[in-house]
Image (cartoon, grey):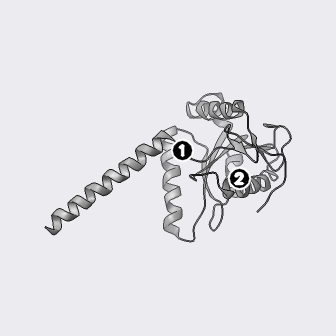
Amino acid sequence: RQRGGTPGTAGGAAAAGAPGRSVYCGGERVAGRSAPRSQHAAVAAAVAAAAAGGEASEAVGVVIVDHGSRRAESNAMLSEFVALYRETTGMSVVEEAHMELAEPTIEQAIGKCAAQGARRIVIAPYFLSRGRHIQEDIPGLVEEAQAKHPGVECIIADPIGIDPLMVKLINNRVDSATCAAKEMAKARA
């Protein structure tokens, strides 16, 4: 769906980072305008402080959102990832959400974070690229959810994107597939 508003923000937040507004940060082009790198640094600092148990630990929540599926097994993978994220980072306010087709929704997850005391919530898309869902659908859903929590600031992080860690991950999968094929060939011989 198409959403209006100021380029670079979800739902037309005139001032990036204003309380009760959604901002899209990361320093990449969004709707023809770049979000300031300082916003990205502020998000990273808040999440790092929360993970380290600093002052912001009770004020920052994370919602990890995927597309959602009609298949329960597919949705369960996000639950596993969220548990791993929570355990690895030490952050306590971490919720899962599905953009569509399944619950919990983005609105429900933001509500859960707010109920746990989060006043800044980072929406972390479990998506690879900056497609329509990242540029339009998720910001629109976050805007709708945030309207129900006016004292909460929602910040949408960049998708997974291109990262050297993804190269390592794909290479590990290639190695695993190659090893499995060799084992299968041995078993048939």
Local packing at callout 2 (Cα closer than 10 Å; few below 14, some 14-19, many 20+) is many
Residue 117 seen in the figure: no
Choose top left, top right, bottom left or bottom right for residue 187.
Answer: bottom left
Inspect the image, locate mark 1, and give the three-letter code of the amino acid beneath it: Ile
Q: Residue furthest left?
A: 189
Q: Is residue 158 above or below residue 106?
A: above
**Viewed as shown, does residue 106 lie left or right of 11?**
left
Local packing at callout 1 (Cα closer than 10 Å; few below 14, some 14-19, many 20+) is few
Q: Secondary structure at mark 2?
A: helix
Which residue is painted at 16% across and 69% down in the image? 188
Query: Which residue occupies the foreground of this view, 32 or 159?
Result: 32
Choose top left, top right, bottom left or bottom right for residue 60.
Answer: top right
Q: Which residue is mark 1?
A: 162
Pointers 1 and 2 in contact (CB under 8 A)?
Answer: no
The disc at residue 135 is: 2
What's the CA distance linking mark 1 and mark 2?
Answer: 17 Å
Q: Where residue 47 sits in the image (x, y, percent)?
A: 62, 35
Query: Which residue occupies the foreground of this view, 132 or 85?
Result: 132
Choose top left, top right, bottom left or bottom right for residue 96.
Answer: bottom right
Which residue is painted at 31% across and 53% down in the image? 176
Inspect the image, locate mark 2, and give the three-letter code of the amino acid beneath it: Gln
Q: Where residue 75 sits in the image (x, y, percent)?
A: 54, 63
